[in-house]
Image (tube, rainbow, N blue to C red):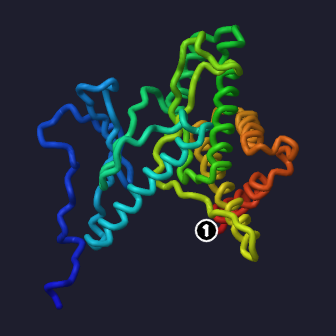
């Protein structure tokens, strides 16, 4: 009947969940799926928290919209928790404080995006043009490439696909030189925005195990392809050695040092994904 017909054009769009007149909430970013707020946390050791607000889509039926929002909010929280449960990723993703769909409460991490950091470093090097190799742009960028490869390789090894790997979704937190790790890196990288993330299929013995393995390799290769395209479009000034360094660190993180870059199945598949991408660009 006409009374039960859903008309998206007549459905009011929800306003931000921020309380009216509350200027303490700072909007950090807004994408197609969510708004990210920086919110004070009084009477706490931490000054701020992050609240990620998934907003409703007017074109979806309200019941379906609510169910999808809840599923995706919970999935993002679960995958972040899964990453933190692995010792190698515990300090490289934000802590989940609470999941209350459509809101996801997260640890606030003080730092720049890798995108902003690289752009600032390039501008700074053009101004100073210093000769100290320990602080040179090339040396710094190589370290970032190595850390990115190691972090993404570890993520894939733990069975998680990020889905939106860009330098805007990786934070870099600098430390004092005295706090540098054994490898000399005076910073830590954090992966953020797991809104499109998903778990890899669990591989079990059986007739479908090869299909699952093949699908997982494809997922990982596509994840890397998204990052590669993002680097090419956002940071065209980076030398080709950036990606080479990233690939080597990625393979090492997968604990396949004996395999080498040339024999890594994910990187082999990445070349196929690249070829498909070029065909789409040429022929649509």
- Work out which residue is located at the far left of the displayed protein and give it: 21
Seen from the viewer's position, the closer of residues 62 and 204 is 204
Residue depicted at 33% across the width and 34% down the height: 49
The percent position of residue 42, horizontal first and vertical second, equals 23, 27
> Callout 1: few (<14), some (14-19), or many (20+) C-alpha neighbours within 10 Å?
few
Q: Quadrant of the N terminus?
A: bottom left
209 vs 119, nearest the viewer: 209
Which is more toward the observer, 72 or 114?
72
Q: Quadrant of residue 187?
A: top right
Q: Position of residue 83 (x, y in %)?
A: 55, 45
For image coordinates 53% across by 35% down, the residue present is 190
* Number of numbered discs on residues: 1
Q: Is residue 244 above or below residue 272?
A: above
Say which residue appears at 14% left-offset and 85% top-offset.
3
Q: Position of residue 40 (x, y in %)?
A: 26, 30
Q: Is residue 35 above or below residue 9?
A: above
Q: Is residue 134 rendered to the left or right of residue 51?
A: right
Q: From the image, which quarter does the C terminus lie in?
A: bottom right
Is residue 133 rendered to the left or right of residue 9? right
Residue to which mark 1 is pinned: 284
| Residue name at image x 29 percent, y 26 percent | 44
């Amino acid at each position: 009947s006409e009374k039960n017909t859903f008309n998206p054009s007549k459905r009011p769009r929800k306003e931000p969940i921020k309380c009216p007149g509350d200027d303490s909430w700072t909007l950090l970013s807004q994408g197609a799926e969510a708004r990210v707020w920086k919110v004070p946390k009084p009477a706490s050791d931490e000054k701020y928290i992050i609240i990620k607000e998934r907003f409703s889509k007017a074109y979806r039926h309200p019941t379906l919209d609510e169910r999808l929002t809840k599923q995706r909010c919970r999935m993002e929280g679960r995958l972040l928790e899964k990453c933190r449960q692995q010792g190698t990723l515990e300090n490289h993703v934000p802590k989940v404080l609470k999941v209350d769909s459509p809101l996801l409460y997260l640890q606030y991490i003080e730092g720049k995006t890798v995108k902003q950091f690289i752009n600032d470093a390039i501008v700074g090097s053009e101004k100073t043009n210093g000769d100290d190799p320990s602080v040179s742009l090339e040396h710094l960028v190589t370290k970032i490439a190595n850390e990115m490869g190691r972090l993404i390789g570890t993520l894939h090894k733990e069975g998680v696909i990020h889905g939106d790997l860009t330098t805007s979704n990786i934070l870099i937190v600098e430390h004092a030189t005295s706090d540098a790790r054994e490898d000399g890196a005076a910073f830590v990288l954090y992966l953020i925005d797991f809104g499109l993330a998903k778990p890899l299929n669990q591989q079990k013995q059986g007739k479908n195990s090869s299909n699952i393995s093949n699908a997982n390799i494809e997922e990982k290769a596509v994840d890397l392809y998204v990052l590669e395209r993002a680097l090419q479009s956002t940071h065209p000034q980076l030398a080709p050695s950036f990606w080479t360094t990233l690939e080597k660190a990625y393979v090492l993180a997968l604990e396949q040092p004996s395999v080498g870059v040339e024999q890594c199945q994910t990187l082999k598949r990445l070349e196929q994904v690249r070829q498909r991408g070029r065909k789409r660009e040429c022929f649509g």
